[in-house]
Image: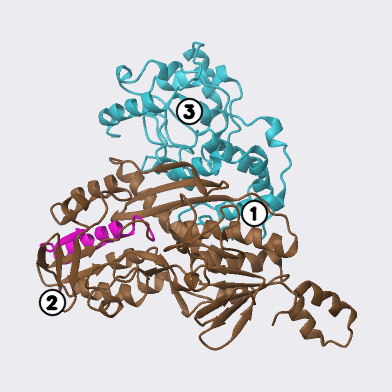
Amino acid sequence: MTLNRRRFLGAAAAAASLSAPMVRAMSKPRVVVVGGGAGGATAARYIAKDSKGAIDVTLIEPTRKYYTCFFSNLYLGGFKQMEDIGHSYGGLAAGGVNVVHDWAIGVDRDAKTVSLAGGAALSYDKLILSPGIDFVDGAVAGWDVTSQNAMPHAYKAGSQSELLKAQLQAMPEGGVFAMVAPPNPYRCPPGPYERVSMVAHFLKQNNPTAKIIVADPKPKFSKMGLFQEGWANHYEGMVDWIGEEFGGGNVSVDPAAMTVTIDGEETKVDVCNVIPAMKAGRIAELAGVTDGNWAPVNAADMSAKADGDIHVLGDASQQGDMPKSGFSANSQAKVCANAVRGALTGSKVFPAKFSNTCWSLIAPNDGVKVGATYEATPEKIAKIDGFISKTGESADVRKATYIESEGWYTGITTDMMG
Amino acid sequence: MQGWGKLLGAAAAVWMTTTLSGAAYAQNADVKSGAEVFTKCKGCHQVGNGAQHRIGPHLNGLFGRQAASYDDFSYSKSFRRAGAGGLEWHADTLDAFLENPRSLASRTRMSFRGLKKAQDRANLIAYLRQFSDDPADIPEADPTAQGSDHNVAQAILTLKGDPEYGQYLSGECTTCHLADGTDNGIPSIVLWPQDDFVVAMHAYKSKKRIHPVMQMIAGRLGDEEIAGLAAYFATLEE
């Protein structure tokens, strides 16, 4: 289908013989959104809501229920149930978004169509890709997707989170929990370390002589001072973090033998959480908008540098200073939605404003946060101002921060899903 | 009972680093005049020997104390949140609060319009200062401090906001605040009187309110943007 929309519209107005449904279907600009996470769901919902039916919005998302990666560590720690972090797409459908549960497997940028695993091809005027992350092949020696049952990544929430929790619960007394942490850039910078905290909390209650080893290719990590203070206060002697200078980046695993070799030293472990290096979700690469592992975008509207009619949101995008987080994706989605709506309906386009805050839980009622505001420059999304929780804060402040994170969770999931 | 000695040290340290920056505290305050000003407060607050909680909490030992920190007094949610966030009573915070109570706690139950004259506030603060222990541990500036202006200029309050722009900007708010006005750990911001909204946002912008996320968000909003948000949220239905 290569009809030019404007030309077709002109013809349709004159041709009374055309059937009415056909005219209506073709007269509306079409937006296809691939990926129903914090970026895609928000963009779909905002475009549908704010265009009041003037734009046809279709969301392609393979899963029936979205389990948020954010707060999935709290599930591991026992602070949340799995159903607390699962969200259906019914709210989006009721809000006017056509939700299609299928895999997008290809993009034809000339024909402007997206092909689905189920066989359909959807045409678009603007395509929004928010596919999240995939893992870089061969990133951790000895590990691939066939190993993920023995050594879960649990970095896309759902069955993997449940698997990791089951393995944690089954650990023998005094056993070893190993984590292979990812190199930068990756989804949710404080995520691995919040996970260490939540695993430590679980073990402290249930298996207090167990140990945690973290092999990390990085010399430092997000909220490092806050986490290390928290580990010393709450889980003294339990966490052994092996950073870059001690060979934390020189790692291989053997999923059959359940061993981890760090800088030449092999250790038998009981649970091994492998979080490999990441790249943009595969569809971004298939669409030809990636350069290396990520999809470079223009900061003003999140459009791909490779194609102005394709926008890339969230983890998959390479935008500048924002961390890869659900909050960032949600923030970018609103800027993108405003720009897409403006391009398709002529609505007013306001200047891009971005923000992010990441809360992490270290122990019960010990919450910390880091956040920043950002603006669009011609080169990138650039940081303006930021803050971070301080070490040594009072218990009241930390508790208030945790309560606030609960409020944020309700807020963002409502903002995404309606 | 308030663990005062310990608190004072910390409070004094916080005080030295975070307050008084650039403000002029020139005039002397008069305790006697402050006692007269306090007659406006007496209906709800007691202070001095044997003071007890009434409609409002008693005001003994106020200086250096965390806001909303008496377990046996029922505070508004706004105040509990401000206290948990780290609001402490010192001359400068009291000065801001007394000038416009809602600048620090939007939904405070203290139905008092505020003291517009800086001298009245300084006098009252000096009067109240007498009922806090251990003056030696508190910088001399505390009881005699004289504040600057905490109210939002009339021109800003009367600025007519563009609700369409406000709607776009509100996307930044609704990542945390629920658009339907329910409160689940983060306060509701819908259907506020526009003036209250504007005053609160400017109090964050000028860092009189201490919440770091809100200081950051409000910090980069211009007057017209704040007006736009106020206009939009004031008219939200549901």
Residue at left offset 58%, top offset 34%: B112
Amino acid on which disc 2 is placed: Ala
Tag shown at residue A257: 2
SS at badge 1: helix
Query: A270 and B109: which one is in front?
Result: A270
User: What residue is disc 3 on?
Assistant: B94
Residue B153 on the magenta span: no
Amino acid on which disc 1 is placed: Tyr
Tag shown at residue B168: 1
Query: A256 and B66: which one is in front?
Result: A256
Residue range (magenta):
A187-215
Q: Chain of mark 2?
A: A
Asked if marks 3 and 1 touch (Cβ < 8 Å), the reply is: no
Chain letter for the part of the structure drawn in brown: A
SS at badge 3: helix
Q: Nearer the viewer, mark 2 or mark 1?
A: 2
Amino acid on which disc 3 is placed: Leu
Quarter location, residue B12: top left
